Amino acid sequence: MNVKDKVESLKGVGKKTAALFSKININTIADLLRYYPRNYLIYGEPCDIESAVIGERVAIKASISSYVDVKKVRKLTIVTCNAKDVTGQVRLVWYNSPFLKQVFHIGQTYIFVGNLSVRKNQLIIEHPEYYSIEQYESMKTSMQPIYSLTAGLSNKTVTKGVKAALPLIDEIKDTVPKEIIDKFSLMPLEEAINGVHFPSDFDSMLLCRNRLVFDEFFIFLVRMAMIREHNVKSVNNYVIDDFTEIDKFIANLPFELTNGQREAVNDIKNDISSNSVMNRLIQGDVGSGKTAVAEIAILATVKNGYQAAFMAPTEVLAKQHYDSLIKDYKDYDVRVELLVGSTKLSEKRRIYEALTNGEIDVLVGTHALIQDKVVYNNLALVITDEQHRFGVRQREKLSKKGEDPHVLVMSATPIPRTLAIIMYGDLDISIIKDMPANRKPIKNCVVGPKYRPTAYKFMSDQIGEGHQIYIICPMVEASENVEAENVIEYQERIKEYFSSEVNIAYLHGKMSADEKNDIMESYVRKEIDILISTTVIEVGINNPNSTVMMIENAEKFGLSQLHQLRGRVGRGDAQSYCIMLCSSDNSDAQKRLEILNKSNDGFFIANEDLKLRGPGDFFGVRQSGDMLFMLGDIYNNADILKKASDAVNYLIKESFPLETLSDNNTTVYL
Ligand code: ADP
Ligand code: MG
């Protein structure tokens, strides 16, 4: 057997299980070994029934205090009994496990582990695990892996599979060259993989995990170095040097460009008219006017006879960009089209064809833009907005469309310069430091729930002056497990505070793309006064007439996210306000919000955010493309990132052939 063999060749893994594995992208034995736990179960010290927390997984030591009752309801067998300790009593329920009647007898003591809930005024645990005191003693402090699953696949099955694969672990190819392992004293890869699946304790798990984080960063940086090398060598296939149209466009803008915008535009002009291809990051705080820079770059491209693509992370934002381009280019004869996931199939087909035939100048959209079906005619510029929402792979894929097009990425994420140089090592960077001159700094306040009526009164006045308002709730609808405001109930509840002339609407991610677009469009047309929304409006949305942003349960959001949300107001010349409503008495939460209260500067906030990030965020293997790394966190693991960067620089200095490192096998795990 070999790690590259299919999972079916493992003992105990049948066809059915293999099919389930393939749903979560586990096909080979190596895939399975590289499928890291997303968290661990820790069997801690049992607690009293009285102090056990409802809604959480608890371990209680209790004695059986009633006869075991077995009932049949239709096809279901229900086993119930009570258990108690000196502080209280809990009801235990199991389904389809009639044999338990023979297991439990009055007076016996067990440790029961499960989720504690309340039903009919009674504490209850459904399907608790049960252990004798000796059994539990031996499990205590051990860490059991928890894997991300798919319907039909149990944690036990994955655990068993990984255990069966362990004997082959030595065969996993280590991408990191031996000289780096020695020079940087890295733990052997087998030991790290083993210890991440089945750690003996927390500290050793962290050490093992750190080695895998190093690998992620290392492979990423190797690829970066290779892209950079490729770019340096890449000649500019699309020399763009006729700037008469964009000079006219800039002169006709309804505003003067800020210094930062002007410098960014100059950098771009220099790049696209030079001998080598452009690869540039535009970094600028929310509201600094990055879209205008993008519009100028696109217009230059189109007026020199080429196509451009403009990619945004959400459909709502893509639509907004599309609308702005149509409006801003109306005197410039540019053919703009929108392509998103929800575009009708017939419409998609028409767009694909027109694009290939060169009948479209600019295609705006979501990642629908980079699907294989999309073939451009002469794509010379690719722009991604809100770059931090995309993975490098998506960026690579887009830049592979066409023949080495110019690449411009835009981001508001204010990552510190030292990190930016490592993370965006393949890009040149332009920073827009200043804000448009007409802006007044946003006025902030952090308040408690009692302040709500005052806030609503204030909003009424703002609406009276013709302005519009956003209210953010963390949840879409009511949930049993989370105590936080939700959009659906909120929009009902707040009606009574406003006159019937005030139009209130809501928006959330579970609505269809059409519904979302309709709402956003009527909001922009000022048919809606108050928009209650989840964070779907967080990125990029621009409606300069909005002057109030109220965030419910502000304590539940990260600082950078709050800053993004706040960035939806203060985008025009009217005074704007951000009301952060904190529903928690926790003093740490209030301290965090205080940082936003006293500063509107994204860089300052990001730095404070870093200082406050505890080391608590180790867990969570990321499955989505939202973040670059599955395990590593560029902030929390900044030291490992630095080490990996040193390692790659060392290899470059030694003229090590980097291309031998990134075979297809390893990049899969990036
Ligand atoms: P972001 O950098 O967050 O993407 P946008 O590009 O959406 O910001 O710009 C925010 C608003 O500022 C838009 O309404 C835009 O028209 C306006 N704007 C951009 N540049 C300027 C400027 N130089 N002067 C005044 N307003 C500007
Ligand atoms: Mg933007």
Image (cartoon, rainbow, N blue to C red):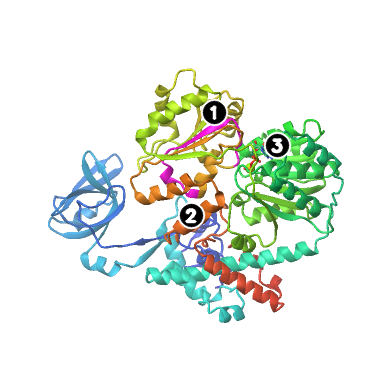
**Residue pointed to by mark 3:** 338
Q: Secondary structure at mark 2?
A: helix
Q: Measuring 58% from the left and 25% from the top, which residue is drawn there?
A: 526
Q: Quadrant of residue 488?
A: top left
Judge whether residue 102 is colored magenta: no
Mark 1 or 2, nearer chain start? 1
Q: Position of residue 212 (x, y in %)?
A: 52, 68
| Quadrant where the image shows the N terminus | bottom right
Residue contact at pointers 1 and 2, CB within 8 angstroms: no
Kind of residue sitting beneath label 3:
Leu
Secondary structure beneath label 1: strand
Ligand 1 within 8 Å, label 1 CB: no
Along the polypeptide, which appears first: circle 3 or circle 1?
A: 3
For label 1, the residue is 468
> At 37% across and 70% down in the image, what residue appears?
201
| In this view, 31 is above or below 401 | below
Disc 3 to disc 1, C-alpha distance: 27 Å
Give the mark toward the camera: 3 or 1.
Answer: 1
Q: Secondary structure at mark 3?
A: strand
Q: Quadrant of ligand 1?
A: top right
Cα–Cα span, label 2 and label 3: 36 Å
> Can residue 473 be seen?
yes
> Dividing the picture into quarters, in which one does residue 107 lie?
bottom left
Q: Earlier in the sequence, mark 2 or mark 3?
A: 3
Q: Tag 3: Cα neighbours inside 10 Å, few (<14), some, or many (≥20)?
A: many
Residue 275 % position (x, y) = 84, 58
Q: Amino acid at mark 1?
A: Gln
Q: Specify the label residue 609 is tagged with.
A: 2
Residue 371 visible from this viewpoint: no
